[in-house]
Amino acid sequence: MKTLLLLRHAKSSWSDSARSDHDRPLNARGEKDAPRMGRFARDEQLCPELIVSSDAVRARLTASAIAAATGGQLLLDPRLYHASAAEILDALQSVVQGDVATVMIVGHNPGLEELITRLTGEREALPTAALTQIALPIDRWSDLNTSTRGTLVGLWRPRELP
């Protein structure tokens, strides 16, 4: 059994129209929500051994806050920037080595929502900084594919936390 945590990047800033989408930083709410979700993950023992994040600034900053709170190893992967569900799975399989039990992907919609649906059969909205936990009936990450059926264990949105 493996655990896949999916986290959409925290809220980003649109204040500088000259900045590319890839280079948008977090806004004030995102700067608050990213470490808050990190503390939540730590407190709920949803601590990934490996955090694989899009290299977009907003995702990287979110993933860094999670890594600081949980102690997970952070790996940036440019393939996750606006990746589809299939592309996320491909990236995941190519970077996870050994006996890693819990991996977190930090990325973007619509790919993350599509991945939740493909792996669990459930449609869930994933607003910024929302976290999901999916239990996967696999022994090795290389066994994970689009036909794998996991269980959606939890979904936490920042606005719903105490």
Image: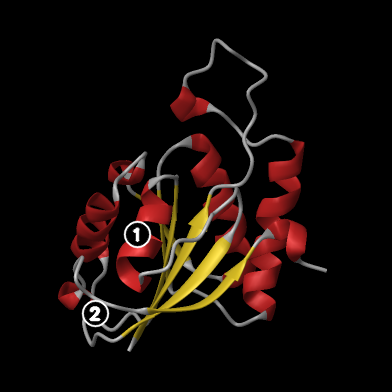
Quick one: label 2, few (<14), some, or many (20+) residues within 10 Å?
few
In the image, which is nearer the foreground, mark 2 or mark 1? 1
- Local SS, label 2: loop
Quarter occupied by the C terminus = bottom right
Amino acid type shown at disc 1 = Leu
Residue that mark 1 sits on: 115
At which x and y percent is residue 142? 16, 73
Q: Residue at x 67, y 19 (%)?
A: 15
Which is more toward the observer, 24 or 159? 159
Quarter occupied by the N terminus = bottom left
Place residue 12 in its image quadrant: top right
Which is more toward the observer, 110 or 18? 110
How was this image coloured? secondary structure
- Local SS, label 1: helix
* On screen, residue 20 above or below 118: above
Residue that mark 2 sits on: 98
What is the tally of numbered marks visible in this picture?
Answer: 2
